[in-house]
Amino acid sequence: MHDMSTHAVPHGAPTSFIRKHVFSIDHKVIGKQYYALALVAALVGMFLSWLMRIHLGWGSFAIPGLHLLSKNGAPGDVMTPEYYLQLMTMHGTIMVFFVLTTAPFAAFGNFFLPIQTGAEDMPFPHFNMMSFWVTFTAFLPIVASFFVSDGPTLGGWTQYAPLSAIGSAGGPGEGWGVILWATSICLFCIGQLLGSLNFITTTLDMRCKGMSLMRLPLTAWAWFITSVMGLTAFAVLMPACILLILDHVAGTSFFVASNLVINDQMLPHSGGSTLLWQHLFWFFGHPEVYIAIVPGLGIVSHILITNMRRPMLSHRVLIYSMGALAALSYMVYGHHMFVSGMNPVSSLAFSFPTLVITIPSTIVVLIWLGSLYGSKLRINSASLFSLGFVSMFISGGVSGFFLAQPSIDIMLHATYFVVGHFHLVMGVAAMFGIFAGTYFWFPKMTGRMMNETLGKVHFVMSFIGAYCIFMPFHYLGIAGNVRRYQAFTDDYLIPLIPVHKFITIAALFTGLAQLIFLYNLIHSRFWGKMAPNDNPWEGTSLEWSTATPPPHNNFGDKMPVVYHDPYQYSVEGASADYVMQTSTEQLKNTDEEK
Amino acid sequence: MAKIFAVTIILIAIASAIPIVMHMWPMPQDISTHGYLIDEQYTDTMWEAGLSFLASQFLLAFFIWKFSSPKPGDKIKSFPGGAKGLVIAAFLLVGTECLALGVFGVKAWASVYFTAPSANALPVQVQAGQFAFYFRYPGPDGTFGPLHPDKISEANANFFGLDTTNDPDSKDDIVTAEMAIPVNREIHLLMHAKDVGHSFYVPELRVQQDFVPGLDVTLHFTATKIGKYEIVCTQLCGLGHYNMKAYLEVMSQEDYDAWIKQQAALQ
Amino acid sequence: MATTVHEPPKIARRLPSEGSGNGGWRNLAPASGDLRRVKDSSPPPASTGIWVGLAAITMSFAAFTSAMIVRQGTAPLVHITLPPILYLNTLLIIASSITLELSRKQIAAFMGGMRDKDHSAVPSRWLYVTLFLGLLFVAGQTLAWIQLKSQGIGLATNISYSFFYVLTVAHALHVFGGLGGLIRVIGKVHNSVLRRSTLDATSRYWHFMGALWVYLLLLLWMKL
């Protein structure tokens, strides 16, 4: 009798267009759908950043056509103060949720985790399909909020209470805008939980013969660790958003204290806690930023190894470091709240794990650098973006060092220093991880290569451009330039406006580079040079052992059997400079993990 | 390509360091008694962060330059000490750095938060509301009258909701739109939020503290230099957030006495 | 009258020495290449999956709990009297866990080939009882809310009632999910396609709902 208990639901290949490309339970299609969603979101988010930057550099500039997007927000095409904040809020929300949580984790992870573990599909493919469609649905309220009369919410992606909880008394967009935002986030949480369920069970239960945990590639480990974080973090954000919605629609006062007065009217709320929102939000929020970066750590490691033709100095150390980052990420969240009014002893308590988290981050960078030493580095778009990631991760990590200390945070909190820090790690490094993954896996996903020249142009422009944008943010912050200001009217800020103009120009230049990438992506998809074979980068992990693109059940009629660690490159005495995981070649002179 | 990239990294690293080294956009001058501890902490951190930044970017560039053009017979080399050495280095270097900064940083933080205001500190209340700061001085009786939120009326310039008819302590309270303080006198700042979250930031004073609706927090500091400074709001409070500010005037004791008398007459 | 022979449900038990493809073999030594045998079987995905789901639910209720605690840190929570029917509902849900375990053991024995001489069909009576008790629980909770409403007490009456409603409604919604799972199991039993792992996973979820309710009741009773 055939043992059915542990198979993924064996599903035959679908035939109709809808089942193949729309409501598909195939993890590869779901991965591509997530990628497409992230791409659209990234373009929207980037466009919003252009609008913001133009306004910051030239506040009274009439951006042609802006009144079409919002006649209240941009009468005569000049952005109002509230519209700036609304665009800023949408920029943050869209980028953090729909790009950084989606592309590195849900897009690449969905496509490649089952393949790298040697599975036919994820164990709950219908939940997986639901996870994409729920995430897609979550995007709709965000888009819709642009078109309600008051516009989107203006409270920042962090939506601090009471501003976010008191309704339209707080300002434009604070009524329906907040409700739409919170609804979107609740839906997003559900999508993430369904996704995490599949990632975790795939990694633990669906590995093929010979694939021990230590034989999983670093990307698989990164996705696994990220999915555990996602499970626990998003499960806290959803209750927070539910309580926020209740404060709006049900007259509760979870986040609104008593005796508050706005526009000379007493607010009807009483008994709520302002800081409660911050605690709940940041308990989610800090792991969230690690959710955004850990897949990148895995992807970059994976790509660098392939292009260095040698494994990292220690596979385990990288895995333990990623795990340590994930574990510590729950203990540091209060560093967003150093001057929030919470107990100053708590601030000190949070600062220590925040400083300690520097250690695994440093270990990761040192392992990368140490592995570069003595390697045979190949330069291509994927490896360039991976190396660029290393540089950006160093820069962003170093600025975090300042913010980890409460006394220094007194000066730098809520300034452009913070904005520079998180853009370097999230807006640049994590994006570089996505680009690297795209250039690297494009041949496997589509059977074609992306244009290398355009890729290199994209890289150089983005690398230089990003530094030109975000390094100056740190100088502005040190000088005391407060963030989330739509214009700089204070005496001490006016002299800094020329710096903002420089940054805007750099931002538009860098934005142009992304359009080159977009062109390359679309053009190569249909007319790119065919990939020379199933393994153009001479990689060792399971994705390179299967057809291009992989068949419906990933490996055809023969499930893979794994004999080797994931990164057997440049092994002494081997028949080639790489030995695939599925190769039956016996190796001597290696210290294989397991 | 690799060599160009390596050189680019180095140039960018150096270019990033120049504005810091040349103090092109320096931190505003310190006019507080406790700020030197924060500034010391900051300078120490900048040295360590700056050197780590330069060293690691240079190393990255150097390795890219050196190892990106392998010749056919080249063998893979292992970094001396291997992973173990690097892990130990990370723990020792970063660990001690973090511990040092963390432990020494307690002093700077404690000087702001773990010391009580002195008995003769001048109490000043600041109220933050969309989109202005208002200040209240207790007047000759030295006590603040109670706040009645239901009596707040911007139209009638009763910003704090004082009931001067029925509350004797409120009668001599002085409400202003500007904050003036005597130099070298400790101030005990009582912070009250009227509506949503705001924050009180004066870079020169080395203070930044959020207002918490529903929880009155306090701060104390001493200004050491006469001049006019800006108090700006740093917590997003609505569309007027960018414009929410007030002037802080640090005056000599005589000038301050004259000012407060003048303000009292205007009530 | 002819006796109808019912086939036992196709329950597959995990036999470590069998299996093929995914989920069956993991680290059993392949024929050649580097070999080290670490584990030779792993749990069925439904089993891991339900733990994952329960972890998420735990985190959510932990968030609600910490919301109460943080809020209590700023000002004491107003005392409220819990509607007495809640205690009856507690007994109902505990009883439903007991009946579910009875059912599970009975079905497991049936799958194992041991048939009660009176039952040639899959024993599902206790499953129905569990479902019934679960429905009674939800009805009882609804009654509690209706009782409060008739006293003019609602979600926004005060912060304590806000938490009361949020916790009890959130729990009840998750119980609905559990009821759905039970119905699904009953359906599969009758079509003879129930997997052991599905039964176990559903049971685990249901027991968790009971334990969660006891925890919530204690929390509400102690804090409010």
Image (cartoon, helix red, strand yellow):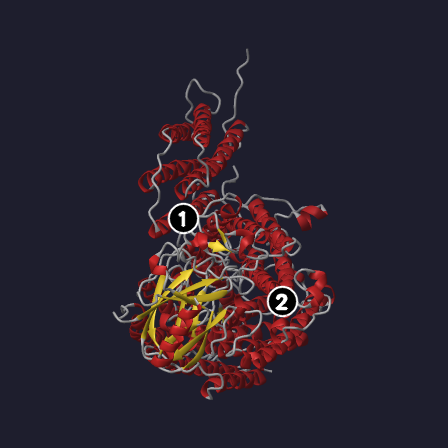
Secondary element under disc 1, as helix, strand or loop, is loop
Residue furthest to the left = B119
Q: How would you rate the neighbour count of disc 2 (Cα within 10 Å): few for under 14, some for 14-19, many for 20 or more?
A: some
* Residue at position x 47%, y 89% in the image: B22
Q: Earlier in the sequence, mark 2 or mark 1?
A: 2
Give the residue number, with chain letter if any, for mark 1.
A271
Dots 2 and 1 on the same chain: yes
| Residue A216 showing in the rendered view | no
* Residue at position x 39%, y 35% in the image: C210
The alpha-carbon separation of the residues under discs 2 and 1 comes to 40 Å
Question: Where is residue A407 drawn, in percent x and y?
Answer: 36, 72
Displayed quadrant of residue A169: bottom right
**The numbered mark 1 sits on a residue in which chain?**
A
Residue furthest to the bottom = B22
**For the residue marked with disc 2, what is the amino acid?**
Met
Question: Where is residue B216 drawn, in percent x and y?
Answer: 37, 59
Which is more foreground, mark 2 or mark 1? Answer: 1
Count of marks placed on residues: 2
Q: Quadrant of the N terminus of chain B?
A: bottom right
Give the residue number, with chain letter if any, for mark 2.
A46
Q: Which mark is residue A128?
A: none
**The numbered mark 2 sits on a residue in which chain?**
A
Q: Quadrant of the C terminus of chain B?
A: bottom left
| Residue C127 showing in the rendered view | yes
Secondary element under disc 2, as helix, strand or loop, is helix
Question: Where is residue C118 drawn, in percent x and y?
Answer: 43, 17
* Above or below for A329 versus A168: below
* Residue at position x 43%, y 27% in the image: C133
* Above or below for A176 versus A566: above
